[in-house]
Amino acid sequence: MTTYDLLIKNGTIVTADTTVQGDIAVKDGKIVEVSTGKSLEGTANREINAEGLHIFPGMIDSHVHFNEPGRTEWEGLETGSRSLAAGGATSFFDMPLNSTPPTINKENLELKRSLAAEKSIVNPYFWGGLVPENIADLKDLHENGVIGFKAFMSPSGIADFNNVDDETIYKGMKEIASLGSILAVHAESTVMCDQLAKEKIEAGKVTARDYVESRPIISEIEAVRRIISYAELTGCKLHIVHASSRKVVEVIKAAQQRGVDVTVETCPHYLSLTVKDIEEQGVIAKCAPPLRDEDEVEDLWRAVAEGEITTIGSDHSPAPASMKVIKDNIFDGWAVYQEHSPA
């Protein structure tokens, strides 16, 4: 008789296509057998009766910011990974900024990896950064296990993680393509967002609606079109993160149809919250790109339903409550990314 480490009995097993009653056997940390319609025979060191419960595949959150080392008080690997586990996640992909030092070279990667080995209770994986000063470090980062690279086309809000100019985009994407890796991109137009914000502030227009209007959908579209053109030129695989509108997704879909290797993520907040939430809650609901109006949320859900969205990532980016207090000037409040750098 087979001996397993774990038997999960009588659960409702959820797959991509259906739900079915059955048993699951685990040995050496891996699922080794799934039985539907009849009970699995064997003994186990541990057995769980999952009758009346649903068994889901472990979730991978491909977009989190755990601020360790350097800003652990914002939230670090220990509490962040425990929250993921409580929600059914088995792995996370940590972004290269918000921790200090950022993950832009091998030394910084090894520091973060050693801390994750000590503190994380789920599987940690790491994005490396692409910044103007680290193109020579990309190969080392790739060979030491980063799952891809992340760049900002507009200021990241983090002083030691600089956004990329067009020269860096070209050189970085050419190098990343040669490594067979992928570039994830925060795509907003610096010029558009900076100029619109300046005009709003100078005119005394500092409400939630003004902030949203200072980062319009067209600023995402412009940046996405530009980075896609570099992907076509270099052959670099591309992933656009946190698209806030189906209009952005349509640009990506058109590129896919002409053969560009590009994927797109959206986030739960763009699928559930609107500008009204920023107006009611203030800085606590501020992010970049910003929340959109209700019709945009509905359109984005249609994109999800029709398979146009590749992934949904949390973009979990915690900060101290003191940085998210309601302010008369919404531009002064901390967002996930903004022009004002934190200490």
Image: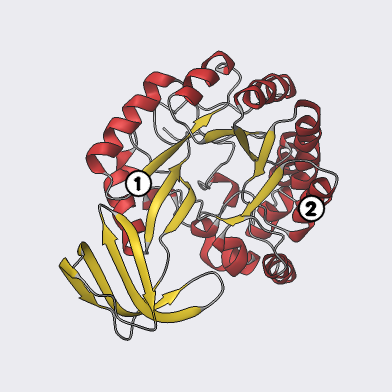
The image shows residue 259 at horizontal and vertical percentages of 81, 43
**Which sits in the foreground, 58 or 252?**
58
Pick out the residue farthest to the top. Answer: 136
**Which sits in the foreground, 148 or 341?**
148
Quadrant of the image occupied by residue 187: top right
The disc at residue 123 is: 1
The image shows residue 193 at horizontal and vertical percentages of 72, 41
The disc at residue 61 is: none
Relative to 282, is 131 above or below?
Answer: above
Pick out the residue farthest to the front. Answer: 1
- Residue for point 50% across, 33% down: 341
- Residue for point 48% across, 39% down: 95
- Residue for point 69% across, 49% down: 204
| Residue that carries the numbered disc 2 in the rendered image | 253
Secondary element under disc 2, as helix, strand or loop, is helix
Question: Can residue 160 be seen here?
Answer: no
> Mark 2 is on which residue type?
Lys
Quadrant of the image occupied by residue 32: bottom left
The earlier-in-sequence mark between 2 and 1 is: 1
The image shows residue 50 at horizontal and vertical percentages of 28, 79
Secondary element under disc 1, as helix, strand or loop, is strand
Relative to 105, is 66 above or below?
Answer: below
